[in-house]
Each structure stands twice: as C-alpha cells, then as structure tokens.
Image (cartoon, grey):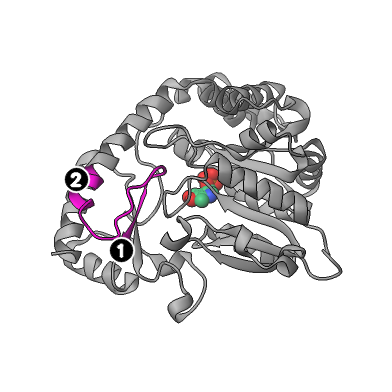
C-alpha cells in the first residue's frame, strides 16, 4: 500500500488493439502523435470539460504525465523573471517531479503548504506579491496526491486571475481526474475556457495510468495554448521520444472508451466506503474526495510506517517523504499515505491491520 500503482485489470481489448497494430513497430512514430490520437484526445477534452482545443496544435501525447510535467518546464520556463532567477511554486507535500524540474532549469522552488489549515490545497494567493512577481510557473495537483483534495471552480478562477496579474503559467497535474467519489472534479482548462482566460496560461496533464489501469503503457497527454504546445513539440523533436505507434493505437482506443473508466470508478467507490467504515471515526481522518490515497493522521509518520511494516507486513509511505522542510515546518511529518490500489479484499485486510496496529 506504499506505491500508487493501480492493480485493477486494464480493459481486455488492449491486447487485441496492440496485436492489430504491431506492424507500427517497424516505423518511426510521428513526433506530435498520430492525427487519430490527437483528435481522440481533443474530443475527450470537449466531452469531459466542455473546452474546445484544436487537435493538431493544442494537444501533445505524452509518455505518461511524468515526462510531460518535467519537460514542460524545460520548454516553457524563462531564464529570468523580473530581472532575476525565476521562482516556481510547488504544493507541499508534492509529487517529486515538480521540484526536480524546477531545479533542472535553475529556478527557485518555493514550497507552499497544502495542509488541513489551507483545505489541503496550496493557498497561492497568500504568497507575498514580491515573490509572485518572480514566479514563472505554478504546479498544482488536483485531485491532489496525497490528500485527495479537489480544486473547485472558485479555486481555479482565483489561480487564473493570480496568474494573469503576476504573469505566470499554471501546470495543472490532473492525472487522478477520473477517480472520484461524487461529482467529476472541474479542470483547469474547463474553468479557463469558462473565464475566457488566455489558453497559454494553462497546461493540463492527463494520464491513462490511473484512469485506465495502464501505468506500464506510459501514455498521457498535455494540452494548452498553441504557442506553449509548439515549444513542447520542438523540445520533443530534439530531445524527446514520441510514443511507438502501436501504443498510440492502444491509447486512442482507451481515450475513446468510458465504460471501463466507469467500472473502475465503482471499484474505488467501494474502497472509499470501506475506508470510511474502518477509519472514519479517527480524529483528523480526511475522507478523500478523489484519487486513491488515504492521508492518515499519526504522531510520527516514519515511526508509524516502520511499526506497521514490522508488526503487520503492511507497507505505507511516511508523509514526510512527500514533503519538503524540517521540524515543525514539514507538512505531512504527522501523516502516512496509504495507496488503496490493491484488490478490495486485500485493502480490507490491510486497513483492518493498520487500524488495529496504529489506532488501538
Ligand atoms: C501526482 C502525480 N503526477 C504524475 C504522476 C505520473 O503518472 P504517469 O507518468 O504514470 O502518468 C503520478 C504517478 O504516480 C502522480 O502521483
């Protein structure tokens, strides 16, 4: 229960689509993705978010979101901002790629707490204006790993207004967007379209890893403004690796189909209910709105994870391993992250052992 690797079955037609397209391994794949995959992704964005993007110029298929989240920084972060080193805002705790990307381009990462006190999302409006003026890029993860929090329309609209005021880009990591409890989480591009924001302010990142249980396919996409996507394509042409054609065919089939996604969500709904039943009475328990992690309160996350592993064989991640800081300034030091990715029976056994070991 330590790693966020989905274990539910992927759709059974994947093998057939792969076999039907195996000849594609004999060709160099097009840098920008096949027209079929680009269009299918643009259609998916229109269905899911009501936002219109042009398939050829506003979509870039990725080898999973991770490479895109990193490479977007190489492609789009300016060398200076307001006369100095640019700053990059990162939620704390966070997905490590954000910090690695900021450091790789010589930007200064600025970690902004995303704790219970801030609704488990970073409050970027609280960052000092003189820092905001130096910000070139803001990373935001919604639904959030590890807290399971979801940015609502108001959050996105405020962030977009802040980006306009201080002239920065928003990199919205939405790879958990299709795993949710009740309503589909609103997306950055959806709200940007509703507000009439500049499309180049926002880049969204999506993945088939969680949505379709295909983490090994390495397939996702970035979508954003024409100028931003052009720069991402240019970087890929020199330094990147387009997806092999047979894998693009599988990705196209997966983005087109929602039945398997709905079925997958139902498995997670049963796990949310299980977690609420077993752990819901704990003070500080956050019922996750989305995603597949529990972010559980303990005294010391590292000590708790070690005790749990030694005494029960259940492995979870100490919250501090996802955060930056020291001492009291380390969000998540008093949490553990529990990945509910295994089959239902295993999750049930794991959560019961966890409760009995850490909370009784
Ligand atoms: C927050 C977050 N972003 C991005 C990724 C990368 O996912 P992938 O590269 O498989 O699309 C992960 C994977 O666990 C993640 O948790």
> Could you tell which of marks 2 and 1 lies nearer the N-terminus?
2
Does the magenta portion include 325? Answer: no
Q: Which residue is mark 2?
A: 277
Can you name the residue that lies furthest to the bottom here?
327
Q: Tell me the crowding category of disc 1: few under 14, some 14 to 19, or many 20 or more residues within 10 angstroms, Cα based.
A: many
Q: From the viewer's side, name the closer residue of 5 and 158.
A: 158
Mark 2 and ligand 1: say if the CB distance to the nearest ligand atom is below 8 Å: no
Residue 149 appears in the rendering: yes
Q: In the drawing, does residue 300 fall left or right of residue 277?
A: right
Percent from the top left, x then y, of residue 118?
48, 59
Question: Residue placed at 74% from the left, 45% from the top?
Answer: 201
- Circle 2 sits in a helix, a strand or a loop, which is it? helix
Q: CA distance from mark 2 to mark 1?
A: 16 Å
Residue 70: mark in rendering: none
Q: In the drawing, does residue 80 fall left or right of residue 221?
A: right
Residue 343 appears in the rendering: no
Q: Quadrant of the C terminus?
A: bottom left
| Picture quadrant where residue 282 is located | bottom left
Q: Which residue is mark 1?
A: 297
- Circle 1 sits in a helix, a strand or a loop, which is it? strand
Question: Residue placed at 23% from the left, 51% from the top?
Answer: 280
Does the magenta portion include 289? Answer: yes
Percent from the top left, x then y, of residue 50?
61, 25
Percent from the top left, x then y, of residue 210?
45, 39
Q: Tell me where the magenta segment starts and ends, as one range.
A: 274-296
Q: From the viewer's side, name the closer residue of 265 and 138.
A: 138
Percent from the top left, x then y, of residue 133?
77, 63
């Amino acid at each position: 229960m330590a790693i966020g690797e989905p274990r539910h079955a992927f759709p059974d037609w994947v093998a057939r689509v792969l076999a039907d397209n195996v000849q594609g391994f004999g060709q160099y794949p097009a840098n920008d993705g096949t027209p079929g995959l680009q269009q299918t992704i643009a259609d998916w964005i229109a269905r899911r978010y009501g936002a219109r993007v042009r398939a050829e110029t506003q979509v870039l298929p990725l080898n999973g979101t991770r490479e895109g989240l990193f490479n977007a920084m190489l492609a789009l972060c300016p060398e200076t901002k307001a006369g100095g080193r640019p700053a990059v805002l990162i939620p704390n705790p966070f997905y490590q790629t954000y910090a690695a990307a900021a450091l790789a381009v010589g930007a200064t990462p600025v970690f902004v707490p995303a704790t219970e006190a801030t609704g488990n999302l970073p409050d970027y409006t609280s960052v000092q204006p003189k820092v905001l003026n130096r910000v070139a890029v803001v990373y935001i993860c919604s639904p959030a790993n590890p807290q399971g929090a979801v940015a609502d329309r108001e959050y996105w609209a405020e962030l977009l207004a802040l980006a306009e005021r201080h002239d920065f880009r928003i990199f919205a990591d939405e790879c958990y967007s299709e795993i949710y409890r009740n309503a589909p989480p609103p997306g950055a591009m959806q709200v940007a379209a509703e507000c009439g924001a500049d499309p180049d302010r926002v880049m969204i990142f999506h993945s088939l890893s969680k949505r379709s249980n295909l983490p090994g396919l390495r397939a996702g996409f970035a979508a954003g403004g024409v100028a931003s996507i052009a720069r991402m394509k240019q970087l890929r042409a020199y330094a990147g690796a387009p997806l092999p054609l047979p894998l693009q065919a599988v990705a196209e089939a997966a983005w087109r189909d929602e039945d398997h996604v709905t079925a997958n969500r139902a498995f997670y709904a049963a796990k949310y209910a299980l977690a609420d039943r077993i752990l819901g009475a704990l003070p500080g328990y956050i019922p996750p709105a989305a995603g597949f992690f529990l972010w559980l309160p303990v005294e010391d996350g590292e000590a708790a994870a070690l005790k749990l592993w030694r005494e029960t064989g259940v492995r979870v991640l100490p919250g501090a391993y996802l955060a930056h800081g020291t001492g009291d300034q380390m969000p998540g030091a008093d949490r553990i992250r529990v990945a509910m990715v295994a089959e239902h029976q295993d999750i049930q056994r794991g959560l019961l052992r966890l409760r009995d070991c850490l909370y009784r």
